[in-house]
Image (cartoon, rainbow, N blue to C red):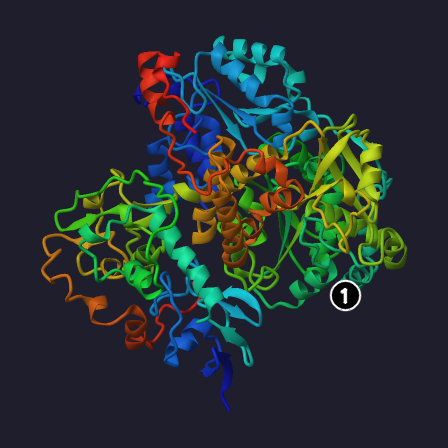
């Protein structure tokens, strides 16, 4: 008999070692998430995947699944928290969806729509984050960075290059690249790198193809992120071992 | 920025970095886990971490260059750009504020023609504020090039300014500046102990590790760092956890504003601390231990190294302790570098491993997956001292002290509005009122128990008792008389949390900043009821979704003062439901500064 837990009234089976998020996605149950990526070890930083487990709020991507847990996810109280977190992320960076070439392919924007976030609601922080356009084929627009560290993890764990790192702390935390000059052109990043594919927002962009796919015809224009995430799952968690 | 050829750094009174880099790496055996320790030494030597030093370290340790910036920029006492030959940091806890630190900082800035936070044009110095340096009973305090100076007065500040202007090396400054008092006002179990060093360890030779653990369990000893986890259960879990090696770690990262009892214990009871660690090592089967000392207490390093060496010489540390084959244990001291979050146990372990001090996802907990993912028993300085006493007295006698659920004594760091600030040791169960009476506090409005992350109580609660069943405390006890503005107290604490947030999780990284802005907006006279509602909303999100205790407790100061001292907030509010934070007149400040004007014509009229 397999172990199971309850998620919003549904019975979710799980394998030993799986987290609540991993088991839920595998069982066709969606829990909103941003820094979680099925191919990487759970990170637990964005907190969008917060759920209520036996009455306590926890990040579901890092919470080990246990038999008999009562998990509540799609409830007003938790969705209100998620909306505030999305608003915080919008206010923290410089996000101008109408002019962003990632519009329609952006997870933050898609989550905003899915959770019905209609306005930032907080004062915008307007941080000063200069672009790095030094690389001939790749543009870094730090304005949109949500500090999920997926590029850091992909470049380190998959590409073996450590092109990206995080510096600073608190609200001055920011993404940096590994070069004496501090510029992307002086790194060994390649267009084929995993780090090029994982940014959930619009920081790491391939040059000269920005609008080749028209807006209205993009990933989250087809169906909302909640449906897309389930189509993508389950994928085998390749980076799930401890480092 | 200074040109590379500027002689200040090459001929710095401190040392010649280029000659020393090789030695620094060798001293730490080129181990990646010692990266932070190397960066701290480079920073102490050159005043900052020059790029060529970073490149050298990255190449020698075979790590990405970006990791150096990543780690260094996490710690507020490390710098990647020059910050002057003299780095002056005024401690900015609320108790320093109450003693006039900001006026003294302004005086020094005026004397030396400098703005806070900026490096002087000639590269001589910079002046800034820093989080509480643990000298609250003898403030206002500052750090100069990492060394603590206490009891600042206008005259002392004037003298310091002169010494800096004359470029007198810090080592040649008057020794009494650096004098740190213990201020022990009331002793007890720990502070009055008459144990010879090694005495309890000798006695423990006759008993098994299991008996040490069962005695600690029976004594009901609970952690003194704030969380109050039962120490015996922790040691037992660590002992039972499988691993290649077991570790003992002493948390001496005493960063909670208003707390300074660990400083006094490390000064006066270092043997007791190390004895507790060694007993713990025997109990859990560890061969190696670390003491993680906050960077602000760097001045204690020489003293602590001396005590460790004496214990090695006395066969109380090292191989075959007290001649017992197989009882090997030694202690290494690691320094922190200005990050409150490293007081959180898993962040401390990350920092010990030479990384950014970001709290880990838990489970697994440090007892099974701690330092280098191995079983680790991590306890507070005072907990190790208490453990020695519990083993010495026996569980029953120890349990007889204090209350039913809080056995033993507790060291309290008393500061703020009272005649006798300092260290007080009481059996658990003492009332707040008793402490206030003993420290000579009168007309008291409120007491902040256990620091900003603890709770603020008003007079109607002064009969409450310190202990796990009522008012748990890590030791801070900040006293505010009726002349104090508790809104400003809470605002100081909110600034502290925003500064110390590690930035890992969304709610704390963004939420503490927003809380700070909202408190500043209210302070500036632009607050509305809407802002109070926003504070309550932020509090809820921080409490329920933050990654660690910092975020979850960051709103406590505001919540408690709003609950008990709401008029302190409401008297500042405008009656409007909403007012933008944008301050039209404030936006002109830069234009006024550039034109040197500050007359009425250069200001917009305040409109209602």
On the image, the x and y values in percent for residue A207 come to: 13, 52
The residue that appears at 48% across and 45% down in the rendered structure is B530
Rendered residue at 12%/47% (across/down): A136
Chain bearing mark 1: B
Nearest to the observer: residue A67 or residue B578: B578
Question: In the shown orientation, is residue B102 left or right of residue B11?
Answer: right
Figure quadrant of the N terminus of chain B: top left
- Where residue B606 sits in the image (x, y, percent)? 41, 24
**What is the x, y in percent for residue B241?**
62, 67
Secondary element at image label 1: helix
Quadrant of the snapshot with the C terminus of chain B: top left
**Eyeballing the image, is A154 above or below B113?**
below
Q: In this view, does A75 lie to the left or right of B476?
A: left
Q: Name the residue located 37 percent from the left edge and 56 percent from the top edge.
A: A86
Which residue is at a point 57% across and 66% down the rendered structure image?
A56
Tell how many labels.
Answer: 1
Q: Name the residue under label 1.
A: B210
In front of the other: A149 or B506 = B506
Q: Evaluate whether residue B539 shows in this view.
A: yes
């Amino acid at each position: 008999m397999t172990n199971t837990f309850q998620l919003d009234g549904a019975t979710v089976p799980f394998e030993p070692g799986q987290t609540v998020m991993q088991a839920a996605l595998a069982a066709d149950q969606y829990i909103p998430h941003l820094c979680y990526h099925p191919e990487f070890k759970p990170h637990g930083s964005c907190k969008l995947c917060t759920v209520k487990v036996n009455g306590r709020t926890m990040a579901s991507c890092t919470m080990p699944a246990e038999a008999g847990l009562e998990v509540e996810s799609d409830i007003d109280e938790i969705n209100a928290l998620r909306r505030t977190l999305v608003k915080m992320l919008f206010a923290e960076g410089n996000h101008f969806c109408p002019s962003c070439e990632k519009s329609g392919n952006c997870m933050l924007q898609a989550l905003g729509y899915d959770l019905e976030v209609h306005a930032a609601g907080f004062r915008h922080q307007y941080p000063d984050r200069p672009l790095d356009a030094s690389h001939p084929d790749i543009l870094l627009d730090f304005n949109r960075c949500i500090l999920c560290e997926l590029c850091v993890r992909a470049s380190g764990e998959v590409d073996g290059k450590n092109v990206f790192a995080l510096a600073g702390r608190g609200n001055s935390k920011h993404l940096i690249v590994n070069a004496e000059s501090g510029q992307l052109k002086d790194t060994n990043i390649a267009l084929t790198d995993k780090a090029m594919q994982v940014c959930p927002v619009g920081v790491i962009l391939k040059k000269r193809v920005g609008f080749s796919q028209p807006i209205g015809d993009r990933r989250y224009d087809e169906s909302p992120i909640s449906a897309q995430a389930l189509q993508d799952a389950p994928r085998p968690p390749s980076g799930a071992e401890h480092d | 920025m200074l040109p590379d050829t500027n002689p200040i750094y090459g001929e710095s009174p401190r040392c010649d970095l280029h000659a020393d880099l090789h030695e620094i790496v060798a001293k730490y055996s080129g181990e990646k886990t010692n990266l932070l320790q190397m960066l701290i030494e480079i920073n102490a030597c050159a005043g900052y971490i020059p790029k060529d030093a970073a490149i050298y370290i990255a190449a020698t340790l075979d790590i990405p260059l970006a990791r150096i910036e990543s780690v260094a920029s996490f710690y507020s006492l490390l710098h990647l750009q020059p910050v002057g030959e003299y780095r002056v940091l005024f401690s900015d806890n609320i108790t320093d504020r109450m003693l006039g630190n900001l006026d003294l900082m302004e005086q020094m800035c005026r004397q030396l023609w400098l703005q806070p936070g900026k490096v002087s044009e000639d590269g001589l110095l910079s002046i800034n504020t820093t989080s509480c340096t643990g000298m609250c009973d003898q403030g206002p305090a500052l750090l100069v090039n990492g060394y603590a100076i206490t009891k600042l007065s206008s005259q002392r500040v004037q003298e310091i300014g002169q010494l800096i202007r004359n470029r007198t090396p810090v080592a040649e400054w008057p020794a009494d500046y650096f004098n740190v008092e213990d201020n022990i006002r009331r002793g007890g179990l720990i502070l009055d102990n008459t144990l010879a060093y090694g005495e309890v360890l000798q006695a423990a030779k006759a008993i098994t590790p299991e008996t040490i653990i069962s005695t600690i369990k029976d004594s009901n000893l609970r952690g003194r760092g704030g969380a109050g986890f039962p120490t015996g259960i922790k040691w037992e879990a660590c002992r039972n956890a499988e691993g290649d090696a077991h570790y003992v770690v002493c948390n001496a990262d005493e960063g909670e504003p208003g707390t300074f009892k660990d400083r006094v214990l490390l000064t006066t009871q270092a043997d007791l601390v190390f004895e507790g660690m060694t007993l713990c090592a025997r109990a859990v089967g560890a061969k190696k231990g670390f003491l993680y000392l906050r960077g602000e207490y760097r001045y204690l390093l020489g003293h602590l190294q001396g005590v460790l060496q004496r214990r090695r010489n006395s066969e109380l540390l090292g191989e075959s302790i007290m001649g017992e084959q197989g009882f090997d244990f030694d202690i290494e001291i690691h320094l922190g570098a200005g990050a409150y979050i490293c007081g959180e146990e898993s962040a401390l372990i990350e920092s010990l491993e030479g990384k950014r001090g970001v709290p880990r996802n838990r489970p697994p907990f440090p007892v099974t997956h701690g330092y280098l993912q191995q079983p680790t028993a991590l306890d507070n300085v005072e907990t190790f001292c208490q453990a020695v006493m519990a083993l010495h007295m026996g569980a029953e006698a120890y349990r007889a002290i204090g209350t039913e659920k809080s056995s033993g004594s507790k060291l309290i760091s008393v500061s703020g509005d009272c005649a006798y600030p300092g260290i007080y040791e009481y059996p658990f169960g003492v009332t707040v009122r008793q402490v206030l009476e003993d420290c000579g506090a009168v007309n008291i409005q409120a007491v902040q128990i256990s620091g900003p992350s603890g709770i603020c109580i008003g007079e109607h609660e002064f009969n409450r008792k310190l202990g796990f069943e009522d008012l748990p405390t890590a030791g801070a006890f900040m006293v505010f008389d009726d002349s104090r503005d508790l809104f400003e107290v809470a605002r100081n604490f909110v600034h502290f949390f925003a500064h110390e947030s590690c930035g890992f999780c969304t709610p704390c990284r963004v939420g503490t900043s927003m809380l700070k802005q909202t408190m500043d907006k209210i302070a500036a006279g632009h607050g509305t009821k809407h802002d109070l509602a926003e504070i309550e909303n932020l509090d809820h999100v921080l409490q329920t979704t933050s990654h660690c205790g910092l975020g979850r407790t960051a709103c406590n100061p505001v919540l408690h003062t709003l609950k008990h001292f709401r008029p302190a907030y409401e008297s500042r509010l405008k009656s409007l439901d909403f007012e933008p934070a944008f301050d039209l007149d404030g936006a002109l400040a830069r234009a006024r500064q550039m034109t040197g004007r500050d007359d009425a014509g250069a200001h917009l009229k305040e409109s209602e």
